[in-house]
Image (cartoon, grey):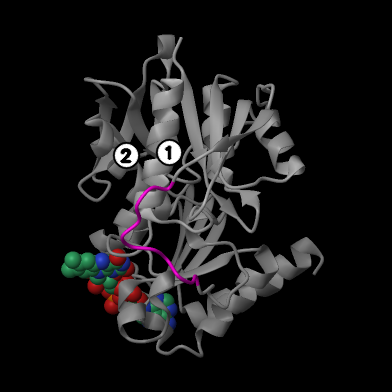
């Protein structure tokens, strides 16, 4: 039996869904740590998905993420509880924090896992390599704790989660000496779900031709509750913000549905979205590489197809 901690991030006071995915997989055998306070309804949610204890780490300079502050506070807490495994989402923060913690402990780290098991309390995971061209089975050896980050949306939400006790407690934490601190976080204008957590994504490529044309994608996104993404060609051409870029040098996404509009399917784009559950491609070129990865392909002009789909979705959804 292993002693397991899941580090959760919050967004506007709400725990990130990837935490619930990880907890579901751990089936009621993990504690949760969060920086700062957490509302009672969020503690209840964590308990419903299997958190045994919810540790709220509180102290000066922990209100905003800082690599040193979070790592100092968390490493002391992890030591105090002798955790064997520490899990977190492979989010921007998780990708920064967890390898840093692994280095502090001189321990192994399995990054960006898309699946894992804990048979007999021992971790075995799957993680994509070489831009997703192959999947590696990984195990962690050497001194504990072992560290794992999990790609958001990859595990999926547990249908029947095993509940945990959800005992919440404050923990006095020390950020220590911080040499680089975040002064301000400027939120993106869009109120939509972040790409990495979105369940449905509709992305536009170079074929969008300009920024204004993205409105056809935005209209469909509003109807089906999607987040809009883009290829690097669209971003480099100034049609879309870099925060929207999907791919090797953009964001890695794993939605239930990914709709690629006027995107050729270059390996660097596929690297960021090939673990999507269902891929739909709309492209005028029947030989576009994206069709080799698509579950459903539509050969045609996106400016004709997307508005038709939007109208059909409106009818179907009664909007
Ligand atoms: C180191 C490195 C990192 C990179 N990182 C990324 C990354 O993170 N993300 C990324 O996306 N790319 C990345 N790239 C770039 C990548 O190689 C491709 O150049 C890029 O993905 C192409 O974008 P695209 O598919 O939008 O454009 P194109 O390859 O030009 O494809 C446009 C497609 O639109 C189709 N089309 C044209 N008109 C229409 C229409 N009216 N309706 C429907 N279809 C139409 C065309 O048939 C074509 O298939 C990277 C490259 C390198 C070298």
Q: Is residue 63 visible?
A: yes
- Secondary structure of the residue carrying tag 2 is helix
Residue ID at (74%, 69%): 314
Give how far across and how far down residue 311 sits, in percent: 70, 74
**Residue at which label 2 appears:** 101
Q: Which residues are magenta?
A: 175-185
Give how far across and how far down residue 273 sits, in percent: 39, 55
Disc number lying in front (1 or 2): 1
Q: Nearer the viewer, residue 160 or 143?
A: 143
Q: Nearer the viewer, residue 149 or 7?
A: 7
Q: In the drawing, does residue 180 fall left or right of residue 108?
A: right
Give how far across and how far down residue 4 sits, in percent: 47, 23
**Residue at which label 1 appears:** 74
Residue ID at (42%, 13%): 121
Residue 183 on the magenta segment: yes
Whether label 1 touches label 2, CB < 8 Å: yes
Give how far across and how far down residue 237 sits, in percent: 32, 86
Residue 155 on the magenta segment: no
**Real-space CA distance between mark 1 and mark 2, rounded to the nearest whole angstrom:** 8 Å
Please tell me in which quarter of the rendered image ligand 1 is found: bottom left
Using the image, tell me which numbered label, if any, was put on residue 152: none
Q: In which quadrant is the C terminus drawn?
A: bottom right
- Secondary structure of the residue carrying tag 1 is helix
Q: In the drawing, does residue 246 fall left or right of residue 319?
A: left
Which class describes the residues within 10 Å of circle 1: few (<14), some (14-19), or many (20+)? many
Q: Nearer the viewer, residue 98 or 155?
A: 98
Residue ID at (51%, 74%): 186
Residue 176, above or below 318? above
Q: Earlier in the sequence, mark 1 or mark 2?
A: 1
Q: Is residue 275 visible?
A: no
Q: Nearer the viewer, residue 140 or 172?
A: 172
């Amino acid at each position: 039996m292993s002693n397991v901690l899941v580090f959760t991030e919050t967004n506007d006071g709400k725990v990130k869904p990837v935490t619930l995915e990880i907890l579901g997989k751990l089936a009621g055998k993990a504690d949760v740590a969060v920086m700062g306070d957490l509302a009672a309804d969020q503690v209840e949610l964590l308990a419903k998905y299997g958190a045994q204890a919810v540790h709220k780490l509180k102290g000066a300079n922990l209100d905003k993420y800082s690599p040193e502050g979070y790592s100092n506070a968390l490493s002391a807490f992890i030591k105090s509880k002798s955790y064997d495994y520490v899990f977190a989402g492979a989010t921007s923060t998780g990708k920064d924090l967890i390898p840093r913690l692994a280095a502090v402990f001189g321990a192994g780290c399995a990054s960006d896992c898309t699946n894992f098991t804990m048979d007999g309390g021992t971790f075995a995971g799957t993680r994509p390599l070489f831009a997703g061209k192959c999947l590696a089975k990984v195990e962690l050896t050497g001194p504990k704790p072992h560290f794992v980050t999990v790609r958001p949306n990859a595990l999926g939400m547990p249908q029947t989660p095993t509940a945990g006790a959800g005992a919440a407690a404050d923990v006095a934490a020390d950020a220590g000496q911080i040499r680089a601190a975040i002064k301000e976080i400027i939120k993106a204008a869009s109120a939509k779900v972040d790409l990495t957590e979105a369940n449905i994504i509709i992305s536009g490529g170079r074929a969008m031709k300009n920024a204004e044309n993205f409105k056809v994608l935005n209209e469909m996104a509003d109807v089906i509750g999607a987040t809009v993404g883009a290829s690097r060609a669209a971003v480099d051409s100034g049609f879309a913000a870099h925060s929207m870029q999907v791919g090797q040098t953009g964001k890695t996404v794993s939605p239930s549905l990914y709709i690629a509009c006027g995107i050729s399917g270059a390996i660097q784009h596929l690297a960021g979205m090939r673990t999507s559950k269902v891929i739909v491609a709309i492209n005028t070129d029947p030989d576009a590489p994206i069709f080799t990865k698509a579950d459903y392909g539509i050969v045609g002009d996106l400016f004709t197809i997307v508005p038709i789909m939007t109208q059909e979705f409106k009818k179907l959804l009664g909007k």
